[in-house]
Amino acid sequence: MTKTVPGALSHVAVVTVSYGSEHVLPAFLAGLTDAQAAGATIVVADNAAVPESAVERIATAAGARYAPLDANYGYGGAINRVAATLPVSIEWILVSNPDVVLEPHAIDELVAAGSADDSIGSVGPAVLTAEGEVYPSARDVPSIRVGVGHALFANLWPDNPWTSRYQRSAEVGGSRDAGWLSGSCVLVRRVAFEKIGGFDTGYFMYFEDVDLGYRLGKAGYRNLYQPAAVVTHTGAHSTRSNQAAMVAAHHDSARRFLDKKYSGWRLAPVRWVLGVGLAARSWLAERRADT
């Protein structure tokens, strides 16, 4: 059964994707109450669902709609499938990892910020780590210069100016526009989401949020960071069992995005340099993950 309590957020859907997420899902769903989700449609997509799933029991007990999927479609693929089934009355879709806990009034803050201007296609909250540190969740889409510098030096020189520019780590304070917002928790305007075709399912894991923000920007929409809304992201719980493979997947997705952004024969040298930098970063990160 879908949770539909009459209220101000009846035009909002909250969609999360589970894949081995039984231990974090209850906290996520419980947090929606304090985040002012009354009236919102809440859907739990279950990638590669199994019969008598614990995810189904947890979702049903919380009053959320359970959406079993017959295969693992990845994060963006699962979101796209659920989004296509939402009622026509839904204007905003809050896309969130299940290992996120929303602070009180977070959804209200996001919706209010997005509703202030029709050109806003997505709104992202301040994302805290499990240790309470602010994660750089609102970043630029990297230019050639910044992209090359970040790819080559991020692991060897963490405080390098190119990575700092990309992550916009020196910026603090109020709301601001960004090139893209972390997909761990982001509110998207449904009409904008549908206009660009939703998530690019070519990204099975990682960089689907970078690509989404980039394409929203190209379509004329703004990506707005609103730190008045706060969430805590405990980490990639479903990927901890194979860190080296996840590191490789991350860099493969990064390479796919950069090849797409810097396409054409004139930019082949740029793609080559970026590819070398990403390969080096991937090698170093995989070695660290294995130790």
Image (cartoon, helix red, strand yellow):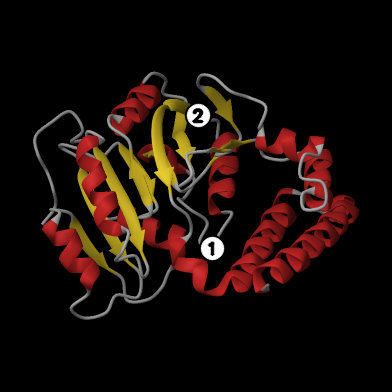
Residue denoted by label 1: 205
Query: Pointers 1 and 2 in contact (CB under 8 A)?
Result: no
Residue 225 numbered mark, or none: 2
In this view, the residue in front, 202 or 38, is 38
Examine the image and state in which quarter residue 179 appears: top right
Q: Residue at x 58, y 35 (%)?
A: 217
Q: Is residue 187 visible?
A: no
Secondary structure category for the residue under label 2: strand
- The three-letter amino acid code for the residue at tag 2 is Tyr
Q: Residue at x 33, y 32 (%)?
A: 106
Which residue is at the far bottom?
51
Q: Residue at x 66, y 32 (%)?
A: 169
- The three-letter amino acid code for the residue at tag 1 is Met
Examine the image and state in which quarter residue 218 appears: top right
The number of discs equals 2
Secondary structure category for the residue under label 1: loop
- x, y (%) of residue 180? 57, 39
Relative to residue 234, is residue 38 depicted above or below? above
Q: Are there few (<14), some (14-19), or many (20+) residues within 10 Å of tag 2?
A: many
Relative to residue 180, is residue 264 depicted above or below? below
- x, y (%) of residue 152? 84, 52
Quadrant location of the N terminus in the rendered image: bottom left
In this view, the residue in front, 162 or 121, is 162
- x, y (%) of residue 77? 43, 62
Q: What is the C-alpha distance between the residues marked 1 and 2?
A: 23 Å
